Image: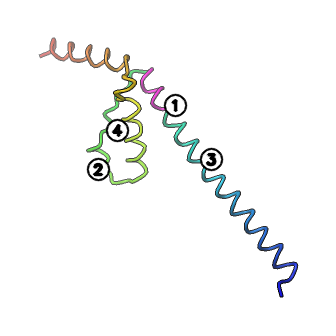
Amino acid sequence: MVSYTQVVHCISCQLITSIGAEALERAGIIARQADVVAALTLEVLKGSSRAFDSEVHKIRNHKGQGVVARRLRSLLHSETYPSEIARKYFKYTAIVRQALN
C-alpha cells in the first residue's frame, strides 16, 4: 500500500520536473532570440561576420559555439532575406581594397 507521504513526494517530483522542463524550453527560446538580436546588432553596426566562419569553429571545437555561429551565419547571409547593409558594405570594401592595391 502506498502512503500519503509517498504520493505527495511523487506529485512534488513531477511538479519540479515539469517546471524544470518548461524552464529549459524557455531558455532555448531566449537563446534563439538573443541570436537574432546579435545578428541585427552586427548588421546595423556593419560588423564583420568572419568571426562566425565555419572553419574557425571547426578548429575551436566547441559544439554550442558552432551552433550559434551557424545560426548567425544563416541569419546574416540568408538568400531569402539578403542583407542590404552587408551587400553595400562588402561592395565598398572591395572597391577600397582595389584602390589600395
Q: Is residue 46 above or below residue 19?
A: above
Residue 61 colored in magenta in the image = no
The amino acid pointed to by label 4 is Phe
User: What kind of element bears circle 3?
Assistant: helix
Residue that badge 2 annotates: 58
Residue 42 colored in magenta in the image = yes
Q: CA distance from mark 3 to mark 1?
A: 16 Å
Upstream in sequence: badge 2 or badge 1: 1
Residue that badge 3 annotates: 26
The amino acid pointed to by label 1 is Val
User: What kind of element bears circle 2?
Assistant: helix
Position of the C terminus by quadrant: top left
Magenta segment, principal secondary structure? helix
* Residue 52 placement: quadrant: top left
Return the residue nearer the eye: 77 or 41. Answer: 77
User: What kind of element bears circle 1?
Assistant: helix
Q: Residues within 10 Å of mark 4 (few under 14, many from 20)?
A: some
Could you say where residue 93 lies in the image, as x and y percent from the top left? Answer: 25, 17
Could you say where residue 53 lies in the image, as x and y percent from the top left? Answer: 30, 39
The outermost residue toward the bottom is 1
The answer to the question of whether label 2 and label 4 lie on touching residues, with beta carbons closer than 8 A, is no
